[in-house]
Amino acid sequence: MANDKIVLAYSGGLDTSVAVPWLKEQYGADVITLTIDLGMVDLESIRERAMQVGAAKALTVDGKETLVNEFLFPALQAGAIYEEQYPLATALGRPLIARYLVEAARSEGAYAVAHGCTGKGNDQVRIDVGVAALAPELKVIAPIRDWGMSREDEIEYGQARNLPINASRSRFSVDENLWGRSAEAGELEDPWLEPPEDAYDWTVPVGSAPDEPTYLEIRFEEGLPTALDGESMNGVDLIRHLNALAGQHGVGRVDHVENRLVGIKSREVYETPAAVTLHSAHKALETLTLSKDQARLKAQISQQYADMVYNGLWFTHHRLDMDAYIRSTQRYVTGDVRVRLHKGVCTVVGRTAPQALYNYSLATYDREDQFDHSAAAGFIDIFGLPVRTQNQAQG
Ligand code: ARG
């Protein structure tokens, strides 16, 4: 066959390592692995492993900046939190993985891309739909979804082919990128059980968090965080810094039973210190800078935006339209927010914005008060008119 290359999204774990010989055997193809750094991986050691398990070529890409600027920050501006709990770390990483797979397939001249998702989760949808949107001509193969091997089968299969696989694994299924860590499966499948401490990795338990709070000032420019305590930082550094700092205070643990796109409910444990901190600070700044009507509509769009991301619909015109609206809402979301990180909680304790709608002389009860109290009685008379009318007519 002339075109016999497949690009496989490769994490270095058991599933995708076994997938390399499996794809070669099933499809008679060369397997080119692609490992993407979205914040948490050691590209070089995974590249070596890929060659050891039989990749024809092992590609790597540093996707951190792109992830932050094109996916995480727009989602932050949108206030996108799925079911009011999950800041969508995994869900925001998947469309970028799909995009890199497509780019690699095109530059390598591959006819198919492959990934290690199971048939039960959201991630398969996000990658398959993402690839289909960007390159409808590419075939998508999901070996783990197709091969019907148990974990033991995979280990046997790998051993029979002398793969240097490391079968030790965490008790949970974990996915990580800069925006957070997702853990599922194992004991977490019993929603009545408190998550065991080893389900967590980025955050300390509240009991061992420092007694002293940390105060931190976050600067936003048009809805994007640009500095911490007055020090300008690029997005990747800022998020890293916040993950460490808020994580030390036990901030960012989320224990959530969520509604998957494939129709089942699943119990997920997330650690997302930077995202939790940034979302609360960003929202606080919007309370100063958006009108009531703007805030009401934006809250509805936020929910739609979160569903869109969760459901793998990133590469759609619907997303572009929502982005245009969101961008427009951020014109005056510039200012500083002070947060207190303490014992697992991020609390906004101060906010200021040069173009705030908050007006001291209207809000104050002191002598500087400029609110026209005498106008209130007439306003209430008209405002209450339909209430009086209805009660008079209908009791
Ligand atoms: N439930 C989350 C989502 O759908 C996280 C999935 C994490 N994936 C994993 N392999 N642990 O976005």
Image: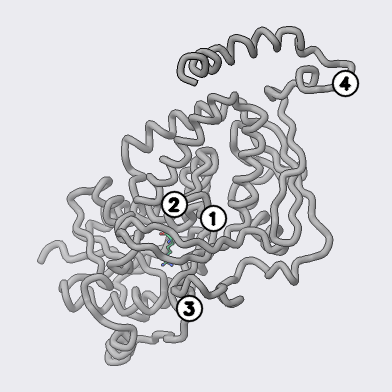
Q: Is residue 104 shown to the viewer in this render?
A: no
Q: Which residue was labeled with disc 3? A: 187
Residue behind mark 2: 92
Q: CA distance from mark 1 to mark 3?
A: 24 Å
Residue bearing the label numbered 4: 366
Seen at 60% across and 71% down, the residue is 201
Question: In x, y percent, where is residue 49?
Answer: 41, 77
Left or right placement of residue 84 versus residue 126 in this view: right
Q: Residues within 10 Å of mark 3 (few under 14, many from 20)?
A: some
Packing grade of label 2 (10 A; few <14, some 14-19, many >=20) is many
- Residue shown at 30%/90% (left/top)? 156
Q: Nearer the viewer, residue 166 or 214?
A: 214
**Which amino acid does the dot numbered 3 rest on?**
Glu
Q: Name the amino acid type tagged 4.
A: Asp
The disc, 2 or 4, on the residue closer to the chain's N-terminal end is 2
Q: What is the number of callouts on the image?
A: 4
The residue sitting at 31% across, 86% down in the picture is: 158
The percent coordinates of residue 187 (x first, y second) are 48, 78
* Badge 2 vs badge 1, beta-carbon distance below 8 Å: yes
Contact between marks 1 and 3 (CB within 8 A): the answer is no
Is 45 placed above or below 353 here?
below
Work out how far the residue at label 2 is from the one at label 3, CA to CA, in angstroms: 26 Å
Apparent side of residue 387 relative to residue 332 in the rendered image (left or right)? left
Q: Secondary structure at mark 4?
A: loop
**x, y percent for residue 27:** 16, 72
Q: Which residue is mark 1?
A: 179
Between the residue at mark 2 and the residue at mark 1, the CA separation in whole angstroms equals: 9 Å
